[in-house]
Image (cartoon, rainbow, N blue to C red):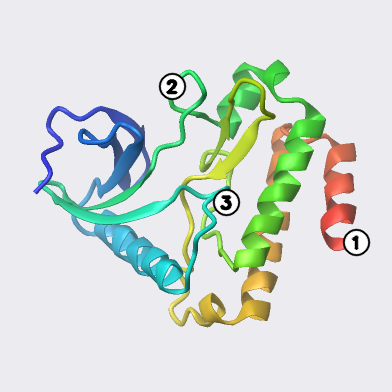
Amino acid sequence: MLELENARVIGMGNDRRVYQDPQNPRRCIKVPRYPDKGSRQNQREQRYFEGLVRRGMRDWSHVPAYHGSVATPEGLGLVFDLILDGDGTTSRRLRDVCNDDPASLSGSELREQLASLYHYLDKRWLIPSDLNDRNVVVQFTPGQPPHLWLIDGISNPDFLPLATGVAWLARRKIARRYRHFLKKLLKGGQLTAADHQQLEVRLWGV
């Protein structure tokens, strides 16, 4: 069992707590905050990611790589890569970057990365269950453009998750949720109306 008593907490959601892995600082461990609800979320995410691994998932370029599970005093922990900036600090949420340091991410850079993230999800049938600017982080590495990562809210919570294994259903669900995400970014001021319209045309020909 992996002890987390002295591990650094790097994130807190409604249902789960995220620690930096005390044995590997480049990984993180997601554990339930509450025995019932958080555990169900972990179990659903575990099933989804283990299904991806069985399917031969190898490209973890916009979603942190999954490294299995570990027993902890707080329940089942899911182990993922921890997304870090070039200076070793934890990459910040898209919301925080746009609000606190907007000059670090230009409109064109954000537009390109949002298009790249969508194509990545669509090509691999990765269904986001909770797509928002708190679950997307921006990684800054010297000499490279900013890079978006979807770090949480990836699974299909449907009671009968048929879309998980059917390409056209998965892609339809991904497109619907991603368009809703872009509308939220527009409403929140992270996307301009012009950038939003460019993405609509680029991604869906609208």
Where is residue 43 shown, x and y percent of the image? Answer: 29, 64
Between circles 3 and 1, the one closer to the viewer is 1
Q: Which residue is mark 1?
A: 205
Residue, x 73% and y 35% (percent of image)? 110
Circle 3 is placed at which residue position? Answer: 131
Which percent across, then down, holds residue 191? 77, 36
The picture quadrant where one finds residue 189 is: top right
- Mark 3: give few (<14), some (14-19) or many (20+) Cα within 10 Å: many
Instruction: Give the answer, above or below, for where 161 lies relative to 5.
Output: below
Q: Residue 30 vs residue 35: left or right?
A: right
Q: Is residue 97 visible?
A: yes
Q: CA distance from mark 3 to mark 1?
A: 22 Å
Residue 185, located in which quarter of the rendered image? top right
Question: Residue at the spot x=34%, y=39% of the render?
Answer: 27
Dot 3 amino acid type? Leu
Q: Which mark is residue 89?
A: 2
Gap between marks 2 and 1 measured at Cα: 38 Å
How many circles with numbers are drawn on the protein?
A: 3
